[in-house]
Image (tube, rainbow, N blue to C red):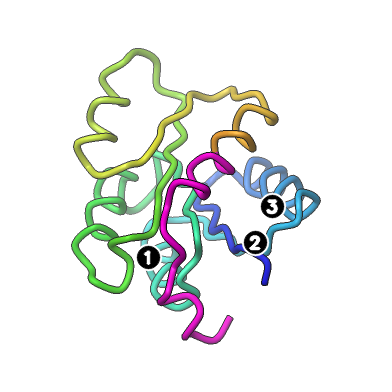
Amino acid sequence: MRMTILVVDDEREVRLFLARGFRQAGFKVHTASNGANGLEKARRFAPDLVILDLMLPDIDGYSVCEALRHDPDTAAIPVLMLTGLAGEMPRYAGVEAGANGFLHKPFVWTELLDCARRTLSKSPPNTVASTRAR
C-alpha cells in the first residue's frame, strides 16, 4: 500500500509542485489550500505525513499543527512545516507546536523528499490510516 501525504499550502504553484513530485516518488497525495481544509482532510484521509505551510490565509500552521496534536485521530501523524519566514524563531515555534521537522522556502526538492522519507521511516505505521477509506 502506498503511503499518503497531505500537502497544505495556500500557494497554488507550491501545492502543484509538491503534489507532482510526491506522486512521481510513489506517494498518494491529497492537497489543501488553507488550514481548515487541511484539518478536515487530515481527519478524513489520515495521511502518513502532513507537509504544512506556516503562513495560511485562515489558520496559521502553528495552530493547525497544535490542533492535529490534540486530536486523538491525528495526533500521531508526523508534520513537516515549510515557511518563507527568515530566521530560527519560526523553527522553534514549529517544534513547540509539535512539528517533526521544519524547512525554509525556497527548499531544495531532493532535501524535502529525503526529509519526508526519513520522517516516515521513523514514525510508527499509521494504524488509523489503514482503517479509514482513502
130 magenta-colored: yes
Q: Quadrant of the N terminus?
A: bottom right
Indicate the secondary structure of the residue bearing disc 2.
strand
Residue 29 - label = 2
Amino acid residing under circle 2 = Val
Considering depth in this image, is 87 or 57 the residue closer to the camera? 87
User: Which residue in the protein does label 1 denote?
Assistant: 39
User: On the rendered structure, is 66 left or right of 54?
Assistant: left
Q: Would you place residue 12 above or below residue 68 in this image? A: above
Residue 123 - label = none
User: Which residue in the protein does label 3 denote?
Assistant: 19
* 3D distance between C-alphas at marks 3 and 1: 18 Å
User: On the rendered structure, is 60 left or right of 119?
Assistant: left
Magenta part of the protein: which range? 116-134
Q: Earlier in the sequence, mark 2 or mark 3?
A: 3
Indicate the secondary structure of the residue bearing disc 1.
helix
Query: Do callouts 2 and 3 mark residues in contact (Cβ within 8 Å)?
Result: yes
- In the rendering, at what x and y percent does residue 68 appear? 29, 60
